[in-house]
Amino acid sequence: MSTLVPSACPYDCPDCCGLLAEVAGGRVIAVHGDPAHPYSRGSLCPKMVHYERTVNHTERLTHPLIRTGPKGEGKFRRAS
Ligand code: SF4
């Protein structure tokens, strides 16, 4: 069983489209346009239509990082 959670697109775009995140078992399994949004009225652009893939990607950064070595070395520590 899934639940629809109202949200908004996180991208830096002036439309700020409304989203409904479909959540099951603590994970976003799909993203839908929010028909109640006054501008986008339920539509989503191609960048967001499968945003659950981005949210659940194994290499997605989930914490801010601070570089600890020279640029390009790939050394970081987690910011507080
Ligand atoms: S869904 Fe697409 S058009 Fe809407 S705010 Fe996000 S990036 Fe912009």
Image (cartoon, rainbow, N blue to C red):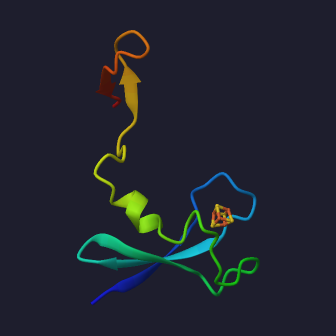
| Farthest left residue in view | 25
> x, y percentage for residue 28?
36, 71
Q: Quadrant of the N terminus?
A: bottom left
> x, y percentage for residue 40?
71, 77
Quarter assignment of residue 37: bottom right
Q: Is residue 40 left or right of residue 72?
A: right
Name the residue located 74 percent from the left edge and 81 percent from the top edge.
38
Identify whether 31 is placed above or below 79: below
Q: Is residue 65 left or right of residue 13?
A: left
Identify whether 77 is placed above or below 54: above
Name the residue located 33 percent from the left edge and 55 percent from the top edge.
57
Q: Quadrant of the C terminus?
A: top left
Identify whether 19 is placed above or below 47: below
Foreground of the two, 71 or 62: 71
Foreground of the two, 47 or 35: 47
**Which of the four quarters of the rendered structure image does ligand 1 lie in?**
bottom right
> x, y percentage for residue 68?
34, 15
| Farthest bottom residue in view | 1
Name the residue located 35 percent from the left edge and 29 percent from the top edge.
79
Identify whether 52 is placed above or below 73: below
